[in-house]
Image (cartoon, rainbow, N blue to C red):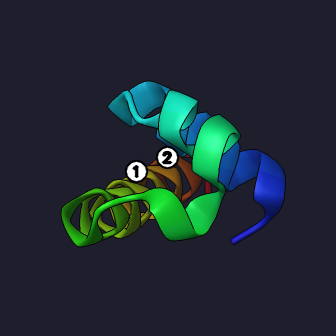
Amino acid sequence: MSEPFKIELAKELGFYDTVKKEGWGGIRARDAGNMVRRAIEKAEQQMVAERRND
């Protein structure tokens, strides 16, 4: 994942303050898992939208 995308997800999921203070190593495993899950959801949504446009 690109850094801007990770930051977007961290803000969306509410733990960006932790990232700013402690870096990515400071987030909980649960937050990392939620970030990955949300990234997958966004990718799936994008794929569905692209199929509709074909």
Task: Tell me how many marks there are.
Answer: 2
Question: 33 left or right of 46?
Answer: left
| Residues at discs 1 and 2 in contact (Cβ within 8 Å) | yes
The amino acid pointed to by label 2 is: Ala
Q: Quadrant of residue 14?
A: top left
Q: Please, is residue 54 above or below residue 33 in the view?
A: above
Q: Residues within 10 Å of mark 2 (few under 14, many from 20)?
A: few
Q: Which mark is residue 27?
A: none
Image quarter (top left, top right, bottom left or bottom right) of the C terminus? bottom right
> Which one is nearer the viewer's eye here, 19 or 49?
19
Horizontal side of 26 relative to 53 (left or right) equals left
Residue 45's mark?
1
Q: Residue at x 59, y 63 (%)?
A: 24
* Foreground pick, 29 / 11: 29
Q: Residue furthest front?
A: 22
Out of 13 and 42, give the one closest to the viewer: 13
SS at badge 2: helix
Please give left or right for residue 50 compared with residue 45 in the image.
Answer: right
Question: Label 1 is placed on what type of residue?
Answer: Gln
Q: For the residue labelled by badge 1, is the local secondary structure a helix, a strand or a loop?
A: helix
Compared to residue 52, the image places residue 15 above or below, namely above
- What residue is shown with label 2? 49
Image point (29%, 56%), residue name: 31
